[in-house]
Image: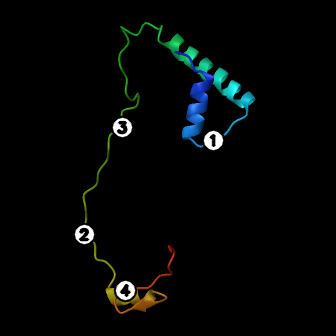
């Protein structure tokens, strides 16, 4: 499989990018070089190679959930710069 100039133009159009003719030629050469390398990798004999998903064994270390006492609502509201009854008022950030 090889990449043509038409392929580069198609992908550029999808990405809404514009390139000069020289840049398109460069991308075409680079992509064909990459595909050539991938083709070379497919020639490797991997029949007797074990599949390794992750070479490091990682074990999750979970801790037990512990219920802790939270702050009193009155203290939270008292520390807020601005409040409306039981709610903390913050500046609007989205129009």
Disc nearer the start of the sequence (4/2)? 2
Label 3 residue SS: loop
Disc nearer the start of the sequence (1/2)? 1
Q: Residue at 37% across / 27% down in the picture? A: 53
- In this picture the colour scheme is rainbow
Disc nearer the start of the sequence (3/4)? 3
Q: Distance between the residues labelled 4 and 2?
A: 24 Å
Confirm or deny contact between disc 1 and disc 2 (CB under 8 A).
Answer: no
Q: Quadrant of residue 35?
A: top right
Q: Where is residue 30 in the image (x, y as percent from the top left)?
A: 65, 23
Residue at the disc numbered 3:
58
Residue at the disc numbered 2:
67
Label 2 residue SS: loop
Q: Residue at 47% across / 12% down in the picture? A: 42
Label 4 residue SS: strand
Q: Position of residue 27 (x, y in %)?
A: 66, 27
Label 1 residue SS: loop
Residue at the disc numbered 4:
87
Q: Nearer the viewer, residue 68 or 21?
A: 21
Q: Distance between the residues labelled 1 and 2?
A: 54 Å
Q: Distance between the residues labelled 3 and 1?
A: 42 Å
Q: Does residue 28 lie above or below 60 as drawn?
A: above
Residue at the disc numbered 1:
17
Q: Does residue 56 lie above or below 87 as drawn?
A: above
Disc nearer the start of the sequence (1/4)? 1
Q: Residue at 45% across / 87% down in the picture? A: 79
Q: Nearer the viewer, residue 49 or 21?
A: 21
Disc nearer the start of the sequence (3/1)? 1
Confirm or deny contact between disc 3 and disc 4 (CB under 8 A).
Answer: no
- In the rendered structure, find residue 89 and report the number of the disc placed on it: none
Q: Position of residue 82 (x, y in %)?
A: 47, 89
Q: Closer to the camera: disc 1 or disc 4?
A: 1
């Amino acid at each position: 499989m090889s990449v043509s100039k038409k392929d580069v133009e198609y992908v550029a159009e999808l990405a809404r990018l514009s390139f000069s003719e020289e840049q398109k030629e460069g991308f075409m050469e680079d992509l064909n070089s990459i595909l050539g390398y991938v083709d070379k990798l497919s020639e490797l004999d991997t029949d007797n190679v074990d599949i390794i998903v992750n070479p490091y064994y990682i074990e999750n270390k979970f801790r037990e959930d512990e219920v802790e006492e939270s702050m009193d609502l009155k203290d939270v509201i008292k520390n807020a710069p601005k409040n409306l009854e039981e709610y903390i008022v913050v500046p609007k950030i989205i129009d």
